[in-house]
Image (spheres, helix red, strand yellow):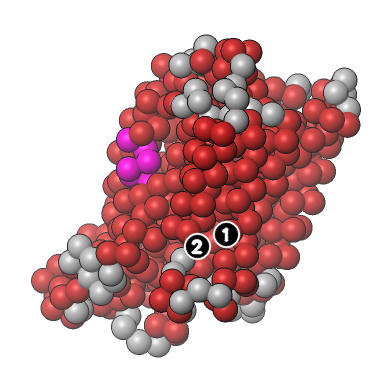
Amino acid sequence: MNLYAVVLLLIVLTLLGVSLSRLRQTRTRADYLVAGRTLPAAVLVFTLLSSWIGSGSLLAGAENGYRHGFAALWQGGGGWAGLLLIYFIAPRARKFAQFTIPDLLEARYSQTARVLGVVAVLFTYTAITSYQFIGGGDILHLIFPGVDAVTGRYILAGFVVLFTAIAGMASVAYTDVAIGILATVTMCAALPLLVHRAGGWGAVHAALPATHFQVFGDITPIQALELFLPTCLLLLGNQSMYQKFFSAKSQRDAQQAVVGWIIGTVILETVIIALAVTGSALFPTGEVHEHPREILAYAATHGFHGNAGVQLLGALLMGAIFAKIISTANNWLFSPATNLVNDIFVRYLRPRAADREVLLVSRLMVVLLGVWALWQSLHTESVLKKSLYAYTIYSAALTPVILAAFFWKRATAAAAVASIAVGTLVTITWDMSWKNVLPRAVAERDAIVPALLCSLVALVIVSLLTPPPSPAQLQTVSEAA
């Protein structure tokens, strides 16, 4: 068994051990869904970091970096801008202290808003989980040539469903600590060594077009905006993030965690793009040129030859990428399962369900949603397109009404329903319906700008045309302000 396979096996066994260690502490609904609201700031930092940086950064972002250079940071930069705003939202979210985003939507708006919110979350989060399976399958194929990439997706899906189902939020959060530390240390150590192998930064710069090192590079400002907006808005309304805040020990822990999250995200996403840019100088042709989303994994297997220490670093880099993908898939699979249990099963079907019954149904939902995400992964060609599609659904459908719940008292229930419905509908139908109606220059644009504008227009106009919300509707959320 080669070194890479040994490292991957050790990582899987470690993650399984951490998950099993939390199992005995998972007895109630709150334990499973929000870790009993006991997560300290240090744990929150790593689980927030691990949930955000997954295949969207490691595959789609790296592919962008390989093709376009540092202009790919426009995608990560949207998240950075969102994080600065989240610093002020985190303590409000923890004070609200429910289980899911649809809890917030019903408290502030209506039951219809809750149900539509669940639908938007299901589409978005299973889509994001699906391309984590693609990334994991690619890595297993590179490490084990006898395992094709599609079979690897099945194996990765099995890992993720098992880890997620065992202990819920506590399992997800504490495995993220181990993964976050491994990924941060390994990637930061790997970058200078890979640059050295390329002949130094000057050699990397000389081997690539000048546009790889420019702010916009070979993309237009509009294309940069289409990368920036979805990540910014997804982060601002991200249910997985709010669920972590709901799991915090206190408002102070939630706000402190955001500071560490900002620092970690800026460092790691910049390192990821730098690794991809260096990889494009080292490996400009061949298999990776045809499949640039694999550049980080390919560099880990082909860029660290030499003594045992260098080879071990390459194996650890591959292991860190694999672990990050598992971590992200855990987070994005767990969140919609929480919606189906908390917002549908407990809210409408079994309001008095015992904790044991809720735990059983929760684990069943993880399995079913894992199967749906796997099916989507088998029908996806481009991780970058899939990620932007998923981000856009959430950004247009939910982020405006979530922010309005905290910051705009005039927003009404009818407006929230209209905004969610319009944002979701425009995103889902944009590529299918509008290309034959609108001018080509408009129809070929990404859905984020039209979907977001339609959602905002619906939110504002319907709010102004309908009676203001009652004091009771405002009270729960205003108490969290």
- 333 relative to 286, above or below: above
Quick check: 419 above or below 157?
Answer: above
**Residue at figure coordinates x 32%, y 35% from the top left:** 84
Residue located beneath label 1 in the image: 427
x, y percent for residue 124: 61, 52
| Residue at screen point 68% across, 65% down | 376
Q: Which of 440 and 290 lies nearest the eye of the viewer?
A: 440
Quarter occupied by residue 131: bottom right
The three-letter code of the residue at mark 2 reads: Ala
Q: Is residue 74 above or below residue 256?
A: below
- Residue 62 in the magenta stretch? The answer is no
Q: Residue at x 27, y 64 (%)?
A: 221
Q: Can residue 111 be seen in the rendering of this structure?
A: yes
Q: Residues within 10 Å of mark 1 (few under 14, many from 20)?
A: many
Q: In the figure, is residue 90 to the left or right of 338?
A: left
Residue corresponding to mark 2: 447
Instruction: Kindly indicate whether the residue at mark 2 contacts the one at mark 1 (C-beta within 8 angstroms).
Output: yes
- Does the image show residue 178? no
Could you tell me which secondary element the residue under label 1 belongs to? helix
Residues rendered magenta in the picture: 79-84
Seen in the picture, residue 344 relative to 228 is either above or below; the reply is above
